[in-house]
Image (spheres, rainbow, N blue to C red):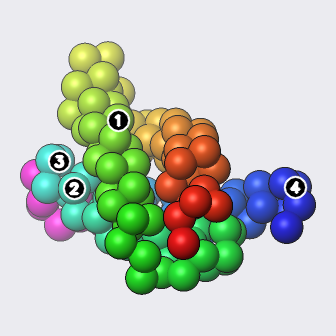
Amino acid sequence: MTRTKRTSRFALVGVSIAILYVLLYLTFLQLGMPQGRANALAFVIAVVVQYAGQARFTFGKQLANPTQILRFGVMTGLGFITSALITGYIAPMFALDNWIAAVAVTLILPVQNYILMSLWVFTKSVS
């Protein structure tokens, strides 16, 4: 697969996941869920969908690969830290609305994730 096609597929899955995350996060907040729990739940749901889409559609990998799943889990943990910092510390520090924090997460995480997925999570050495 060409780099352009892979990047396009990554973007398609990523945009879908970003929309899913924002909608879930804001919906959970509207339902009265605390910020930390709303972020965590929206993030976990989005990550499960992201793994399936990126593994199969973008990188053409099998889903049930323990090494790949572990690497994806580490990548996800790093993403969660980034997400929590943005929604729980940076946005409140600057008195930003929740929707701005959610959008910031959806802009920053794709860059972080693409780098990690391309160079480590879905590398050829993972079979």
Q: Amino acid at mark 4?
A: Thr
Residue indicated by mark 3: 35
Q: Is residue 99 visible?
A: no
Q: Is residue 29 magenta?
A: yes
**Whole-percent x and y of residue 125?**
58, 60
Nearer-N-terminus badge (4/2): 4
Dot 3 falls on a residue whose secondary structure is helix
Left or right placement of residue 63 versus residue 48 in this view: right
Q: Amino acid at mark 1?
A: Thr
Nearer-N-terminus badge (1/2): 2
Residue indicated by mark 4: 4
Residue indicated by mark 2: 40
Characterize the local packing of mark 2: few (<14), some (14-19) or many (20 or more) Cα atoms within 10 angstroms: some
Up the image or down, 44 lies above or below 52; here it is above
Characterize the local packing of mark 3: few (<14), some (14-19) or many (20 or more) Cα atoms within 10 angstroms: some
Dot 4 falls on a residue whose secondary structure is helix
Q: Is residue 67 visible?
A: yes
The front one of 115 and 71 is: 71
In the image, what residue occupies the spot 74% across and 66% down?
9
Q: Amino acid at mark 3?
A: Gln
The front one of 33 and 15 is: 15
Quote the CA–CA distance across marks 1 and 2.
12 Å
**Whole-percent x and y of residue 54?**
58, 68
Placement of the N terminus among the 4 image quadrants: bottom right
**Whole-percent x and y of residue 39?**
25, 52
**Whole-percent x and y of residue 120?**
53, 48
Q: Is residue 100 magenta?
A: no
Q: Which residues are magenta?
A: 27-34
Dot 2 falls on a residue whose secondary structure is helix
Q: Amino acid at mark 2?
A: Ala
Characterize the local packing of mark 1: few (<14), some (14-19) or many (20 or more) Cα atoms within 10 angstroms: some
Quote the CA–CA distance across marks 4 and 2.
32 Å
